[in-house]
Amino acid sequence: MTDKALFQPYTLGSLTLANRIVMAPLTRNRAGTGLVPSELATTYYAQRASAGLLITEATQVSAQAQGYQDTPGLYTQAQIDGWRKVTDAVHANGGRIFVQLWHVGRISHVDLQPGGAAPVAPSDIRADTKTFVNNGFFDVSEPRALEIEEIQGIVDDFRQAAAKEIGAERTGIRISPVSPVNGISSSDPQGQYDYIVDQLDTLGIVYLHVVEGATGGSRDVAPFDYDSLRRRFKNTYLGNNGYDLELATAQLNEGKAHLFAFGRPFIANPDLVERLKTGAPLAALDPATLYGGGARGYTDYPALAEASAQ
């Protein structure tokens, strides 16, 4: 295969993707009143619909599941309607879109929790990290340990957020085997994630989304055999972290992944697929506008043709 294969259609379950380039989930903290996706969000995702698949910013399945300021939800009718507008706009531009659902667990703050309650987590151990709240980054709050009988309620929250039970062909899982973000660690990541992927494979989910290395950081943070995961998973393997055209092409040629997620390059380059395909230069993002705010640094990055006309 050559780099042209990246830009050819790909079959993902029952969907046909225009190419193998995926927009990774990118938290932008711009939800509107009621944590509803705004009209700006509709524009933002529609601008990037040339990706083979868009994966939305992580979206909480309940009020308790929120861990960052102004992230959208998918548990009220207004939020559902907001996401429907986004989806319709992406489809109108020929794109495909999945929503990334989350429950943040202990990575939250009492100011974001209903009634100022403590976040819930598997244990009461506070993470040594910060979250974006009150327009800045502050230490996360100490959680309380979740009761066993509460687990089914969280499962039901995920079911409700996904249009009841949408099936394996519309479900993917994102894992981060060695990423140290938010204080996560494992004494045996290879054994743990080999087992996890074995179990996921039996469910027949449509893709396995793997953060290879530290989330948003080095790919070489710790030794890990990602090929072991790929061999264990019979459906689509989606590689994520630090990909550019050269690396994606090499990994595709070597059969190491089927799809490739690009994150930050999509922020400043709504037409990233075309720029990669033609070898055009990539625009740089403005770090000051990553989290929160309005159109600036969100929907005002021009496509290449627009930039040339200015």
Image (cartoon, helix red, strand yellow):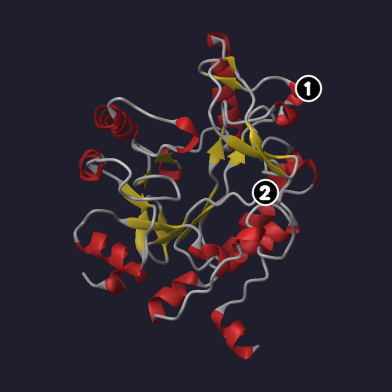
Q: Quadrant of the N terminus?
A: bottom left
Determine which of the numbered discs, if any, sits on residue 115 in the image. Answer: 1
Kind of residue sitting beneath label 2: Asn
Query: Which type of secondary structure does the marked residue at label 2 adopt?
Result: loop
The percent coordinates of residue 108 (x first, y second) are: 63, 30
33 displayed left or right of 10: right
Q: Residue furthest right?
A: 33
Q: Quadrant of residue 248?
A: bottom left
Determine which of the numbered discs, if any, sits on residue 29 in the image. Answer: 2
The percent coordinates of residue 277 (x first, y second) are: 39, 77
Residue 89 visible in this rendered orientation of the protein: no
Kind of residue sitting beneath label 1: Gly
Please rate how many residues cluster around mark 2, counting C-alpha atoms within 10 Å: few if below 14, some from 14 to 19, many from 20.
many
Instruction: Name the N-terminal-most of marks 1 and 2.
Output: 2
For the residues bearing labels 1 and 2, Cβ distance under 8 angstroms = no
Query: Which type of secondary structure does the marked residue at label 1 adopt?
Result: helix
Q: Quadrant of the C terminus?
A: bottom right
Q: Nearer the viewer, residue 234 or 288?
A: 288
